[in-house]
Image (cartoon, rainbow, N blue to C red):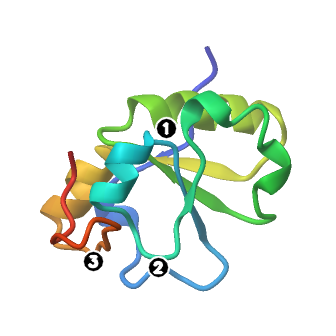
Amino acid sequence: MPAVPTVSMSGVPDPLPEGLHVLDVREQVEWDAGHIEGAQHVPLGELTQRLDELPEGQVLVVCKVGGRSGQAVAWLHQQGHDVVNLDGGMLEWEAAGRPMVSETGQPPAVV
């Protein structure tokens, strides 16, 4: 398996730079509970069918801890996309106090 381009939370600018897209590959219930504002949601299982929805340019791929996003990054990298995996995923994002939004009416949380 080729090395997966990965960035640690400390390497992610705050706020996120213009032109950097965020792709969240978690399941719907996880997304609804809390996600990065402006992120695009495509569950890992749907990625191959929805490849044409991905934006051009650099994409930061996230999941809960980095496993699913690592799989997504490895595959997207093979397809020629400029992608990087967030090491530690949304748990690290939340721990760093970065802003999140939820779809549930409750305070955002990583589930």
Does 76 appear above or below 22?
above
Task: Identify which amino acid the numbered label 3 is placed on.
Answer: Pro
Q: Which residue is mark 1?
A: 69
Name which residue type carries label 2: Leu
Sequence-first disc among 1 and 2:
2
Residue occupying image coordinates x 30% and y 38%: 65
Q: Secondary structure at mark 1?
A: helix
State the mark number for residue 99.
Answer: 3
Above-or-below relation of 44 to 87: above
Label of residue 104 in the image: none
Neighbor class of circle 1 (other Cα within 10 Å; few <14, some 14-19, many 20+) is many
Q: Quadrant of the C terminus?
A: top left
Counting from the top left corner in percent of width and height, residue 31 is at 39, 53
Query: Residue 35 at what x, y percent from top left?
Result: 36, 63
Which residue bears the numbered disc 2? 16
For residue 97, side relative to residue 104 (left or right): left
